[in-house]
Every structure is written in structure tokens, then in C-alpha cells.
Amino acid sequence: MSGRLLIVHGPNLNLLGTREPDVYGTATLEDANDVCRAAAEAGGFAVDIVQSNHEGALVDAIQAAQGTAVGIVINPAAYTHTSVAIADALAAVGLPVVEVHLSNVHAREPFRSHSYVSPHASAVIAGAGIQGYRFAVEHLAALLSD
């Protein structure tokens, strides 16, 4: 293994598969996690996966990644648009970050186009459904191998 990647899922992603399937699809969170595990394994990485509806728990997980992970894939969900705390945690740990969104946030309500996370991410993948997680892990693996 080339190290561990932290996969972070924000609020309401535990409801994938049943929550607004016309927007988020019918794949479940476990399906998304399986995509992450497979892509990480193919790239020689292990994964730690966390999902929480609580901002502080996400901040704690990001901070705990310092010294244990080599990169972070994060779908901050609604916290994308509101959480300076998550953005600050990402900046503080100094790990490479890829931001993921299942839907194309730029084709939705205007407030969804602003991200506090994007300035700390090397890439943002939006609108690719759960395959966006695969793209994110593959991008992070390529970034880490350079």
C-alpha cells in the first residue's frame, strides 16, 4: 500500500438511494464507498471512510487524518456552502484534497455554486454521480505518485 486516503461524506449522504433520486441517483452510500475502496485498491491505497451529519465530527476526522492519511476525498454536501470550519481544517492539515459532488452544483440553485472547500482542493468533480468518487480517488492517486 502507498498509504491511506480519507474519504469524507457530509450531511444527508447517509440517505443516498432514497433521498431525491432524481437529483442524487439511486446508488447508496455503501455503493459510493465500494467505488472508493475499489479505486483506492487499484491505486495501491487503503481507505478510511467517515460520514457524519455533524460539522464538528467532520472537522475531527479531517484533523485526525494529519499523520495517518496521505490525501482526502471530500463530499462536504451542504457544508460546502457554509462551513469555514471544514475549510480551515483542510487548510490546517495540509493534505492534498479532491472535492466531490454527486450533482452538478453549478446547474442548481445559485447558492450551491459557492464552495468554501474549493480553494483547498486540487480538483473539484461535480455531476458524475458516484463515479465522481472514482475519478477523485484516481486523481488523488496520480497526484500522490508524481
Image (cartoon, rainbow, N blue to C red):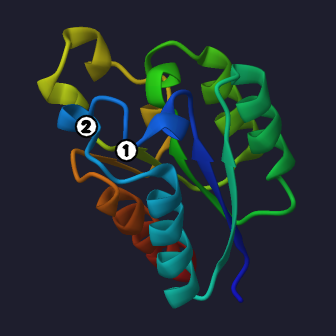
Please give the name of the residue rendered at 31% of the width and 43% of the height, measured from the top-left corner.
102
Q: Is mark 1 on a helix, strand or loop?
A: loop
Q: Position of residue 115 (x, y in %)?
A: 40, 24
Residue that extends furthest to the front in the rendered view of this protein: 18
Q: Residue 21 carries which label?
A: 2
72 w.r.t. 55: above or below? below
Residue 52, horizontal then vertical, whole percent: 67, 33
Q: Along the horizontal axis of the image, is 14 left or right of 28?
A: right
Residue 144 vs 75, above or below: the answer is below
* Label pair 1/2, CB-CB below 8 angstroms: yes
Residue 82 visible in the picture = yes
Residue 30 position, x and y percent, is: 53, 58
Question: Which residue is tagged 1?
Answer: 17
Callout 2: few (<14), some (14-19), or many (20+) C-alpha neighbours within 10 Å? few
The structure residue drawn at horizontal position 71% and vertical position 89%, both measured from the top left corner, is: 1
Q: How many marks?
A: 2
Task: For residue 104, say whether it is visible.
Answer: no
In the rendered view, does 109 fall on the left or right side of 134? left
The kind of residue on which mark 1 rests is Gly
| Identity of the residue drawn at 69% across and 22% down | 55
Query: In the figure, residue 136 lies in which quadrant?
Result: bottom left
Quarter of the image for residue 10 reads: top right
Residue at x-position 48% and y-position 35%: 15
Placement of 40 over or under 10, stated as above or below = below
For residue 41, the mark is none
Identify the residue at the far left of this view: 107
Q: Which amino acid does label 2 sit on?
A: Pro
